[in-house]
Amino acid sequence: MPKKKSTSKASLKANRPELVLQIRLLCGDVIALGPGKADLLEHLAETGSLQASAARMNMSNMKAWRLVKDMNSCFREPLVLAARGGSEQGGSQLTDSGREVLQLYRAMQRDADNALKARWRLLEKKLA
């Protein structure tokens, strides 16, 4: 039987606990928006390139296209306008709706973090 690894209190204190909230908006079985998709939208807003955004996230171009397709299909208006092609023909940009959805999502994250701060402090005291 394999031995269980023991964890000392010193090593637990070195790895201070933290609360990590992840909000996911579902559209049926599809994640319409979550942490990774929000990050992709932010990178896209900065770079204007889906390929560059995917590279920043160590993601394949095909996966980035699939995520954009999923997001666009779940919202009433597209979040991203994308054109396939080389450096002169291609390019992607957030729509006004995409910027608004991203801002609302990030605000929801901040609101959730703030709402749970007091209870988290109480729970954190009970952790080793």
Image (cartoon, rainbow, N blue to C red):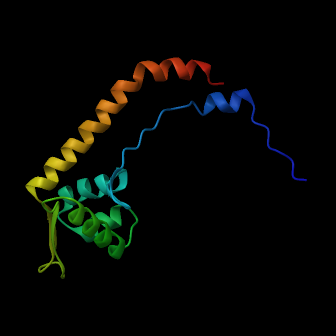
- Residue drawn at x 55%, y 23% as measured from the top left: 124
Q: Quadrant of residue 13?
A: top right
- Residue drawn at x 17%, y 60% as measured from the top left: 79
Quick check: 81 above or below 96? below
Quick check: 27 above or below 12? below
Residue 44 spot, x, y in % from top left: 22, 60
Residue 10 spot, x, y in % from top left: 70, 28
User: In the orientation shown, which residue stands out farthest toward the right?
Assistant: 1
Residue 50 spot, x, y in % from top left: 24, 68
Q: In front here: 71 or 121?
A: 71
- Residue drawn at x 11%, y 54% as measured from the top left: 97
User: In the orientation shown, which residue stands out farthest toward the front?
Assistant: 28
Quick check: 123 above or below 95? above
Q: From the viewer's perspective, is 126 left or right of 3?
A: left
- Quarter of the image for the C terminus: give it: top right
Residue 5 spot, x, y in % from top left: 79, 43
Q: From the viewer's perspective, is 113 left or right of 81?
A: right
- Residue drawn at x 62%, y 31% as measured from the top left: 14
